[in-house]
Amino acid sequence: MKLIYLTAAVALTAAIATAPASAPAGAPAETIKTVAGEFDDVFGDLQDAVINRGLVIDYVGDVGKMLERTADAARGSGSKPPYLHARYLQFCSAALTHEAVDADVHNLAMCPYVVFAYQTRARPDEVAVGYRQVTLAPAATSQAAQAKVHALLEAVVNEAVGANP
């Protein structure tokens, strides 16, 4: 049994040591954009940008409310999180996910895709909109699938903030 754990530890250490230190090729350098506006309007635009592509939103999370609810326990009495609002959406594209897992079964980790919007106390006049970067296996077929996922996520964010690609 100890040999199995030792082998797993060596394999994990090797995987970490050989993992790329920088963003994968083709990954966009900027995944967060800002826009002036009311948070609820911008978040609605983000939801619409997903739905407009024929995709289904699986879950809407409200990190801002969770941070408010847990602030005293996590930080001490009277502390406030940096956000006025902070929410995210989870969704997936069946076509892109099939392509990615066909390239490598480990690419299942990419799904669901996550896009988010937040408004900070420090900058209440703007809303930040972005997406979680997806990193797939290093094979060329995986990287091609990753580029398509990033293009989708970037298009969703651009639509939500009114940016032209």
Image (tube, helix red, strand yellow):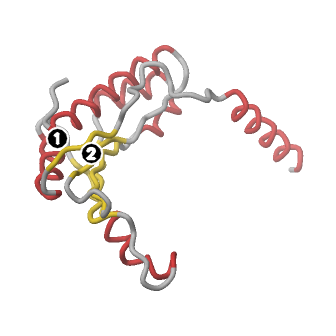
Secondary element under disc 2, as helix, strand or loop, is: strand
Seen from the viewer's position, the closer of residues 114 and 45 is: 45
- Describe residue 142's horizontal placement relative to residue 114 as left or right: right
Name which residue lies at 46% across and 37% down.
Answer: 108
Distance of mark 1 from mark 2, alpha carbons?
A: 8 Å
Residue picked out by circle 1 = 160
Residue picked out by circle 2 = 129
> Badges 1 and 2: C-beta atoms under 8 Å apart?
yes
Q: Measured from the top left, where is residue 65 in percent x and y?
A: 31, 71
Mark 1 residue type? Ala
Q: Measured from the top left, where is residue 116 in percent x and y?
A: 30, 49
Which quadrant of the view contains residue 132?
Answer: top left
Mark 2 residue type? Val
State which quarter of the image contains the C terminus.
top left
In this rendering, is residue 66 above or below 15? below
Name which residue lies at 44% across and 29% down.
Answer: 101
Seen from the viewer's position, the closer of residues 95 and 21 is: 21
- The numbered disc on residue 119 is none
Q: Circle 1: is it few (<14), some (14-19), or many (20+) Cα within 10 Å?
A: many
Q: Measured from the top left, where is residue 112 in percent x and y?
A: 36, 44
- Describe residue 160's horizontal placement relative to residue 111 as left or right: left
